[in-house]
Image (spheres, rainbow, N blue to C red):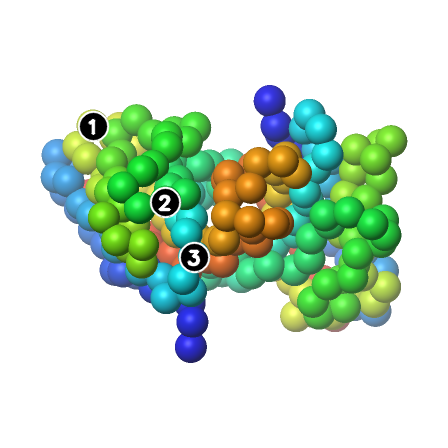
Amino acid sequence: AQSVAQPEDQVNVAEGNPLTVKCTYSVSGNPYLFWYVQYPNRGLQFLLKYITGDNLVKGSYGFEAEFNKSQTSFHLKKPSALVSDSALYFCAVRRANQAGTALIFGKGTTLSVSS
Amino acid sequence: DGGITQSPKYLFRKEGQNVTLSCEQNLNHDAMYWYRQDPGQGLRLIYYSQIVNDFQKGDIAEGYSVSREKKESFPLTVTSAQKNPTAFYLCASSTVAGANVLTFGAGSRLTVL
């Protein structure tokens, strides 16, 4: 069965410092991995995805994520956090050979950036 | 602009009543999805559809029903059989090819009084 784990319910970081939001996954075969962000009472917005190729993926708003196959991880990173980055972040996965199937989401991590 | 429209944004229901949440997309996507979001539980899949007139149950389909009569529309009915329907409901759509990045609507918040 496919699953996603986000081990931290909340991450706190000061503005200007680097941030990391952790994600590990379990899937048979090759994974497609995604990060989404959600602001209060809104839908999810796509940040970035890993399909194949370079393990470091760059996305929207200066975010990037590193795919590590041996550790089955896909951590979200940003070199310098902004207060406006404060939101709920979701990691998601699906099997690469299952086009059109639903994504499996983690429980989410709340990022709080203080000024 | 292309996107997904969910309505209503807020809905209140008495116990024992069925309610239908609307989801319409103009992205020409073949696949559509319904997720339920509860605090601390992330997103859980209710139903999804990859093509008109066909849909599959997700992890928490009990107490819900859907239809897919048109490519653009995927309404969700929350029936009286759903024991704890108060939640935030998210509709999404995607292509069925490639990485199928999901595009989400703004959500509908259902409260049962």
- Residue B18 location, quadrant: top left
Of the two numbered discs 2 and 3 on the same chain, state the one appearing first in sequence. Answer: 3
Q: Is residue B52 above or below residue A19?
A: above
Q: Chain of mark 3?
A: B
Query: In the image, is A27 to the left or to the right of B71?
Result: right
Q: Is residue A62 above or below residue B50?
A: below
Three-letter amino acid code of the residue under disc 1: Ala
Three-letter amino acid code of the residue under disc 2: Ile
Q: Chain of mark 1?
A: B
Of the two numbered discs 1 and 3 on the same chain, state the one appearing first in sequence. Answer: 3
| Label 2 – label 1 distance at C-alpha | 27 Å
| Label 2 – label 3 distance at C-alpha | 9 Å
Reading the image, the residue beneath label 2 is B51
Q: Are marks 1 and 3 in contact (CB under 8 Å)?
A: no
Of the two numbered discs 2 and 1 on the same chain, state the one appearing first in sequence. Answer: 2
| Label 1 – label 3 distance at C-alpha | 30 Å
Instruction: Give the x, y percent position of residue B105.
Output: 41, 59
Is residue A53 something that shows in the picture? yes
Instruction: Give the x, y percent position of residue A44.
Output: 52, 57
Q: Which residue is drawn at the image coordinates 29% and 50% (left, top)?
A: B74
